[in-house]
Image: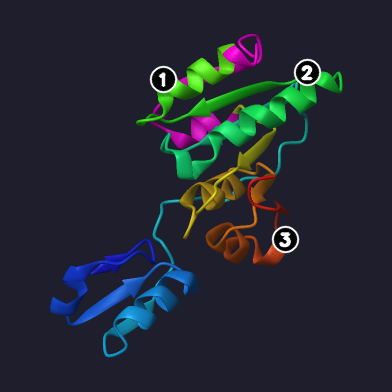
Amino acid sequence: QVLHTPSYKPHLKDVSAALCVSGRVREGAESRFPDLRLFDVANFSHLRALPVKSKPNAVPMIGAMGRLHSIKGFDLLLEACVELRAAGQRFELRIAGDGPERASLEALTRQLRLEDHVRFCGWAEDPLTFLHGVDLFVVPSRQESFGLVVIEALAAGVPVVASDTEGPREVLRGGQFGALFPKEN
């Protein structure tokens, strides 16, 4: 079994071993199934490292990507955009992904009067193409046990700012490879 989250999975009592994509995932599995053989194996992806973009867009492009679900914190990112606008910062935000919160996030965008700044792009068939167009990648998650998008953004040469959750903290080595901010901030 491959484990991507530390959440309870009752079927683990029936497997002989599990591959854990992060230390946090392994710790969660260990606490619930102490006799299960667990192995740390980094999440697989076909990535090639690209140099950091040398020239930003004329209007800074902020990118975010993921399943549009409340745990991913896209509402927090929209609230942060209100602060950017109030500070007079020019920016555009592109959100790639889809999910159960899309309609409410679009409604929040209208409520916050951010329609001129925010674009919902749907699923990115090619994440690298999406990432190539952004200057900064933000991961505002309330909970993130791994965060493949963090690795994809770094490999694409895009600086990352992420909430200080388990996965991004591990991938960014506590802030060594990208900036971390407190959850819900």
User: Do tag 3 and tag 2 residues touch (Cβ < 8 Å)?
Assistant: no
Q: Element under label 1?
A: helix
> Residue visible at 66% across and 15% down?
117
Residue 175, labelled with which disc?
3
Tag 1 residue: 103
Q: Residue furthest left?
A: 14
User: Do tag 3 and tag 1 residues touch (Cβ < 8 Å)?
Assistant: no
Q: Element under label 2?
A: loop
Residue 107: percent from the left, percent from the top?
50, 16
Q: Amino acid at mark 2?
A: Ala
Q: Is residue 125 magenta?
A: yes
In this rendering, which labeled residue sits more in front, label 3 or label 1?
Answer: 1
Q: Amino acid at mark 1?
A: Ala
Q: Which badge, 3 or 2, comes first in the chain's sequence?
A: 2
Tag 2 residue: 58
Q: Amino acid at mark 3?
A: Gly
- The segment highlighted magenta reads 111-132
Residue 185, labelled with which disc?
none
Q: Residue furthest bottom?
A: 35
